[in-house]
């Protein structure tokens, strides 16, 4: 594999390895002429929505943004819903750990745009909106050039939009909000966007890579597409791997490829575990990584929540959960951009430098919440108690908050063999508060353990076993637990 | 627009806005106090589950209780301010001093005073002994009952079929909750809840 550096934006360079399809033939650049030469002799595109849906279903092409939703179903739904459909290409990853869509937009914009045209023409859409990340101006520039170059040949006009520099800016409902002229934040929607999306019109919104895969499928045909990958999951997939190097690696691999050698190639090892799926992802223990292959089913088997919205983000048996406080922070992460949870709460502003080693006080300095290195290159100062900062987050009043908190505080279904491990190590520093139980008063109601499972668990008689020191990020919850105690038996004291 | 219209009507006394607010808040209050009571009763009775932990019931009890206090304030203030019936401010605090519906209004005033005591002791809970707090807190049952009787006896809408039906539903809800608590207290000690991880309480605005 040959390497190539792509300056995706300020402070956001990535290594790109040439791949078999999407990332093939990188030497000739992203130009339209080269792209057209590659597409010579391509098959005719499917021209109707049933035809396209059938094609997509034949390989079960699923969204590559994280939810793994079948694209064919979106196409069918949008085509039969009321109103003129719209197509949205979502290249705003938002996820600080993922760079694959930006990379794709920089290197093969026309493949993505082809895919969007293909879908738009099949379902009769009148507009294609392309949304690129705000924190990577190079991507915006590249895509603008690409759209301008091909404007006269395209049947469906395209318009380009820039998402804000924010973690959740790439979430699908946030993207639709942006396109509607409202703040680029996720909202709760009652109907799927394929039924009623942008301006109430049926909207096919998918990740940039999904459209590129659709374009490849239409260009090469099913048989050629299935040459790579596994029978259940044909084709390839883009990955972002963040290892020890100074920049993440983006590569394209066929489904079914073993992950371990890829990690090695990207200068990453999983000796301390692996975070799969970025910020909302799942920690995998080293032994689960050893034989893991790149495929949705294998990752589900390994306990990672890939493409399941409802999946709890925790896995069992990291070597020692307490290690995260000491030296053993598991810090290799593969950013398979499969966001396991569709968080609908605004969260960390997260462009700028990616989080790396998050131990000790320096963790605050390189935390992604610390601002977006935008075009001006200024880093806004961190806000205290930023409601969007997962480390200091006061509780956010929305449906997504539960999911978010479960991750941040490791709140997950606990059962035998599972441990409470958060992908984000708790804020460090000496504890300022201690919890104590007045045993005369305690009646074992157990509300403290409900509210503060991080520090309190109940013994077999339902009496609390309390970890005394309260980490800073749990102080609010500790107060809530103290207030909730029906017997006023739980107290906060100074050490 | 609407606010201005309402204000104009109030100033000109063209429409008995305050009177309607009084009647309406009374009805809402019955519902809210019932929810508060039921949640409070059940907080100690039902075991928590993952979907609805006991801390959630407790938070609901507190927050709906707070909302009830707001409506109670509206109810009392509109009674005093409105001139449709002549109730002076001290008559709204000292029971059985009112010239209008002395007994039934008096019951409501007793309920108000009891609820006031419950609110104050709950706010000072961390300074009081558990027993004292609890002793005062159980008068909420009485306050709820007095309030209900007050509403049924002198409420302008109490004679309507839907008014009676609403009160009956509220009474039934409290009765069922109390029954459930008595049964569960007999069956198992109150502490036999199932400990669970809890994503729900946080939604309910814990302080």
Image (cartoon, coloured by chain):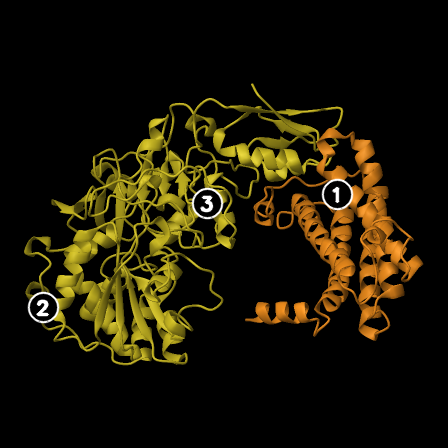
Residue position for label 1: B119
Residue position for label 3: A313
Label 2: how many residues lie within 10 Å, few (<14), some (14-19) or many (20+)? few
Identify which residue is drawn at 58% across, 71% down: B2
Q: Nearer the viewer, mark 3 or mark 1?
A: 1
Residue position for label 2: A36
Q: Residue furthest right?
A: B103
Of B198 and A397, nearer the camera is: A397
The answer to which of marks 3 and 2 sits earlier in the sequence is 2
At which x and y percent is residue B34?
Answer: 77, 56
Q: Colour of chain B?
A: orange
- The answer to whether residue A10 is left or right of residue B82 is left
Name the image quarter holding the N terminus of chain A: top left
Label 1: how many residues lie within 10 Å, few (<14), some (14-19) or many (20+)? some
Quick one: which chain is yellow? A
- SS under mark 1: helix
At which x and y percent is residue A334?
Answer: 31, 42
Label 3: how many residues lie within 10 Å, few (<14), some (14-19) or many (20+)? many
Chain at numbered mark 3 = A
The vertical placement of A399 against A473, above or below, is below
Q: CA distance from mark 3 to mark 1?
A: 41 Å
Identify which residue is drawn at 44% across, 52% down: A343
């Amino acid at each position: 594999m040959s390497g190539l550096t792509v300056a995706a934006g300020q402070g956001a360079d990535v290594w790109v390895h040439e791949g078999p399809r999407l990332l093939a033939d990188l030497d000739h650049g992203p130009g339209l002429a080269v792209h057209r030469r590659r597409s010579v002799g391509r098959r005719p595109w499917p021209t109707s929505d049933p035809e396209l849906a059938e094609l997509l279903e034949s390989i079960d092409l699923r969204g590559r943004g994280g939810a793994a939703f079948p694209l064919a179903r979106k196409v069918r739904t949008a085509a039969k819903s009321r109103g003129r459909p719209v197509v949205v290409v979502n290249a705003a990853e938002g996820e600080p750990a993922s760079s694959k869509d930006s990379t794709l937009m920089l290197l093969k914009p026309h493949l993505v745009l082809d895919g969007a045209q293909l879908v738009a023409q099949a379902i009769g859409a009148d507009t294609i909106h392309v949304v690129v990340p705000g924190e990577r101006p190079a991507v915006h520039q590249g895509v603008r050039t690409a759209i301008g170059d091909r404007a006269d040949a395209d049947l469906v006009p395209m318009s380009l939009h820039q998402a804000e520099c924010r973690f959740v800016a790439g979430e699908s409902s946030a993207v639709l909000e942006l396109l509607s002229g409202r703040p680029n934040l996720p909202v709760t929607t009652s109907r799927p966007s394929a039924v009623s999306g942008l301006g109430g019109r049926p909207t096919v919104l998918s990740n940039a890579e999904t459209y590129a895969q659709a374009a490849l499928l239409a260009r090469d045909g099913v048989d050629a597409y299935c040459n790579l990958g596994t029978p259940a999951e044909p084709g390839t997939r883009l990955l972002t791997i963040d290892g020890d190097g100074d920049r993440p690696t983006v590569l394209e691999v066929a489904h079914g490829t073993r992950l371990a050698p890829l990690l090695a190639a990207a200068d990453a090892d999983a000796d301390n575990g692996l975070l799969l799926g970025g910020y909302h992802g799942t920690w995998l223990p080293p032994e689960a990584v050893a034989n893991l292959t790149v495929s949705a089913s294998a990752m589900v088997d390994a306990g990672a929540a890939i493409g399941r919205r409802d999946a709890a983000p925790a896995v069992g048996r990291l070597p020692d959960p307490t290690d995260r406080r000491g030296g053993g922070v598991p810090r290799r992460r593969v950013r398979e951009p499969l966001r396991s949870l569709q968080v609908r709460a605004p969260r960390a502003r997260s462009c700028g430098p990616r989080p790396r080693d998050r131990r000790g006080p320096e963790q605050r300095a390189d935390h992604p919440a610390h601002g977006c290195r935008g075009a001006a290159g200024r880093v806004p100062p961190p806000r205290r108690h930023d409601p969007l900062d997962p480390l200091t987050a006061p509780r956010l009043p929305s449906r997504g908050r539960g999911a978010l908190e479960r991750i941040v505080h490791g709140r997950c279904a606990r059962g035998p063999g599972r441990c409470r491990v958060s992908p984000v190590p708790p804020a460090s520093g000496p504890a300022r508060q201690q919890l104590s139980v007045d045993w005369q008063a305690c009646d074992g109601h157990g509300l403290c353990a409900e509210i503060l499972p991080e520090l309190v668990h109940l013994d077999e008689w339902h009496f609390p076993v309390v970890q005394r020191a309260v980490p800073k990020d749990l102080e609010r919850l500790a107060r809530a637990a103290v207030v909730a105690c029906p017997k006023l038996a739980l107290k906060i004291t100074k050490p | 627009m609407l606010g201005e219209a309402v204000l104009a009507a109030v100033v000109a006394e063209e429409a008995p806005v305050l009177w309607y607010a009084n009647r309406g808040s009374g009805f809402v209050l019955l519902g809210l106090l019932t929810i508060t009571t039921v949640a409070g009763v059940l907080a100690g009775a039902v075991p928590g589950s993952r979907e609805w932990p006991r801390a959630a019931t407790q938070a609901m009890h507190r927050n709906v209780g707070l909302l009830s206090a707001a409506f109670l304030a509206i109810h009392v203030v509109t009674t005093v301010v409105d001139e449709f019936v002549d109730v002076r401010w001290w008559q709204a605090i000292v029971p059985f001093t009112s010239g209008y519906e002395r007994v039934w209004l008096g019951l409501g005033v007793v309920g108000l005073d009891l609820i006031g005591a419950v609110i104050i002791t709950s706010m000072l809970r961390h300074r009081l002994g558990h027993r004292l707090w609890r002793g005062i807190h159980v008068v909420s049952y009485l306050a709820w009952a007095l309030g209900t009787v007050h509403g049924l006896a002198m409420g302008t809408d109490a004679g309507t079929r839907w008014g009676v039906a609403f009160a009956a539903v509220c009474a039934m809800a409290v009765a069922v909750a109390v029954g459930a608590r008595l049964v569960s207290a007999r069956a198992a000690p109150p502490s036999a809840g199932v400990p669970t991880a809890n994503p729900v309480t946080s939604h309910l605005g814990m302080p």
